[in-house]
Image: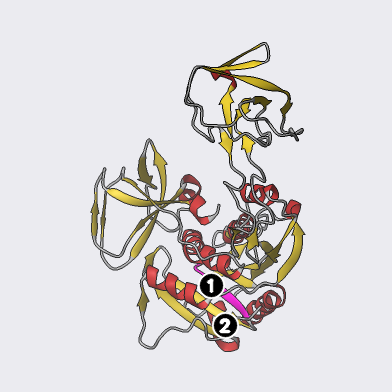
């Protein structure tokens, strides 16, 4: 695949604060798939994978006219009632079609899913008729084609049934199988490296002092990558040392299609991720008008894109979902997506100031949206408490109970 340009994340001169929608559009316009294609992969192995080519149906579905009910096949319409039709011996069943011709003015037994025999085009429901002494007695009218499925009414031969970039699910695999598609071309899994940084950060299980914290970001982001269907590459943890950060990024560039880092992306003395990327790569610090979040480092390092997330777990989570998830989808060969939001009544009050979008940890209860009691970015309990995010745009807003708000469930991001 064509690699990304080294300057693909560069901001125009003079740009300072970037609104969320503008930042998302810039990402979308500058990214493209970076993974290779796997050819002719069996359907048993493609669940959750991304389709690399359009698929056209090799046959129609259904392949022939068939019955939607158990009953009797005849030539419609039936308008002159009551009437009696002699029954042809035999029947048409789903696994054993009737191969003869039904004479004009006759009927034949037929079962659900069975091919409609030649000479008939209509099926009368078993409960709507009487049978006695080899005769079918009808008391009600019936339009031509009633209770019959036409060949190709769902899918016609050569129809495009799935498009490039579709993430295959069990239901889509069913569509492929229904027309006899055995295998498809898919993109290789996007390999996403996850790297934590910081002297104060220690892995779970390590001995810590009062000034040190356990690493919540790497397990969280690793789980996110895996749940989104990508191949996780654990790049571990790097101390605030330029040589450690550089070595970790070099491992990532060798083995990954994308690197997610957390922490060290601002302009402080110990922000070695941004310093290393500036010294050895091509970095653009996007100051996005979002809360929590704001600093988002986007860089190219030895040909590999790097998304530098904030070190705070809540901000890292919000930015990973709002910016990282659609970007990873596009790099992986899927379509860029805007997460589905639902307008619902608020069950909270808030006086929002203008200037930045805000993402509030939220959940739905009894048809209303409630938000976590504290907006503090250090309150990781709000992540587990929430089912999604309330997104408030840059404008000033006065929200009271009952005010319509945009709720984005985590499922809208592919989780």
Q: Nearer the viewer, residue 329 or 233?
A: 329
Q: Position of residue 286 (x, y in %)?
A: 44, 77
State the SS at label 1.
Answer: strand
The residue positioned farthest toward the front in the image shown: 104
* Residue matched to label 2: 277
Q: As drawn, is 96 to the left or to the right of 338?
A: right
**Residue drawn where x is 38% and y is 88% of the image:** 13
* Residue matched to label 1: 308
Q: Tell me which numbered mark, 1 or 2, is placed earlier along the sequence.
A: 2
Label count reads: 2
Q: Which label was assigned to residue 342?
A: none
Where residue 364 sits, quadrant-wise, is top left
Q: Is residue 50 visible?
A: no
Measure the C-alpha gap from mark 1 to mark 2: 10 Å
Q: Say if the magenta span includes residue 77.
A: no
Q: Nearer the viewer, residue 55 or 111?
A: 111
Q: Say if the magenta span includes residue 306.
A: yes
């Amino acid at each position: 695949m064509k690699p990304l340009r080294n300057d693909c994340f560069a901001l125009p001169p003079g740009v300072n604060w970037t609104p969320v929608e503008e930042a998302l559009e810039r990402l979308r316009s500058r990214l493209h798939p970076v993974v290779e294609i796997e050819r002719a992969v069996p359907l048993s192995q493609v669940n959750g994978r991304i389709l690399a080519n359009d698929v056209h149906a090799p046959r129609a579905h259904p392949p022939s006219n068939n019955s939607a009910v158990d009953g009797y096949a005849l030539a419609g319409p039936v308008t002159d009632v009551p009437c009696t039709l002699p029954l042809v011996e035999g029947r048409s069943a789903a696994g054993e079609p009737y191969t003869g011709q039904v004479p004009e003015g006759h009927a034949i037994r037929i079962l659900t899913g069975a091919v409609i025999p030649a000479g008939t085009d209509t099926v009368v429901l078993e409960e709507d008729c009487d049978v006695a002494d080899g005769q079918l007695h009808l008391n009600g009218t019936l339009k031509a084609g009633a209770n019959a499925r036409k060949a190709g009414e769902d899918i016609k031969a050569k129809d495009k049934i799935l498009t490039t970039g579709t993430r295959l699910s069990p239901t889509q695999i069913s569509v492929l199988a229904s027309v006899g598609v055995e295998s498809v071309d898919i993109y290789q899994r996007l390999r996403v490296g996850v790297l934590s940084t910081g002297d104060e950060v220690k892995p779970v299980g390590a001995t810590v002092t009062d000034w040190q914290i356990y690493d919540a970001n790497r397990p969280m982001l690793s789980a996110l990558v895996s749940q989104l269907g990508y191949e996780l590459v654990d790049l571990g943890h790097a101390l605030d040392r330029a040589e450690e950060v550089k070595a970790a990024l070099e491992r990532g560039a060798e083995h990954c299609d994308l690197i997610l880092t957390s922490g060290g992306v601002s302009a402080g003395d110990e922000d070695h991720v941004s310093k290393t990327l500036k010294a050895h790569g091509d970095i653009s610090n996007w100051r996005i008008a979002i809360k929590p979040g704001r600093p988002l480092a986007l860089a190219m390092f030895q040909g590999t894109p790097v998304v530098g997330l904030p070190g705070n777990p809540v901000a890292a989570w919000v930015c990973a979902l709002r910016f990282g998830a659609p970007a990873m989808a596009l790099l992986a060969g899927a379509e860029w997506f805007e997460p589905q939001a639902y307008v619902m009544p608020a069950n909270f009050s808030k006086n929002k100031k203008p200037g930045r979008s805000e993402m509030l940890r939220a959940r739905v209860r009894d048809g209303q949206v409630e938000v976590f009691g504290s907006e503090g970015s250090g309150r990781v309990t709000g992540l587990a408490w929430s089912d999604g995010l309330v997104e408030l745009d840059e404008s000033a807003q006065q929200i009271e109970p009952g005010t319509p708000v945009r709720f984005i469930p985590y499922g809208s991001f592919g989780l």
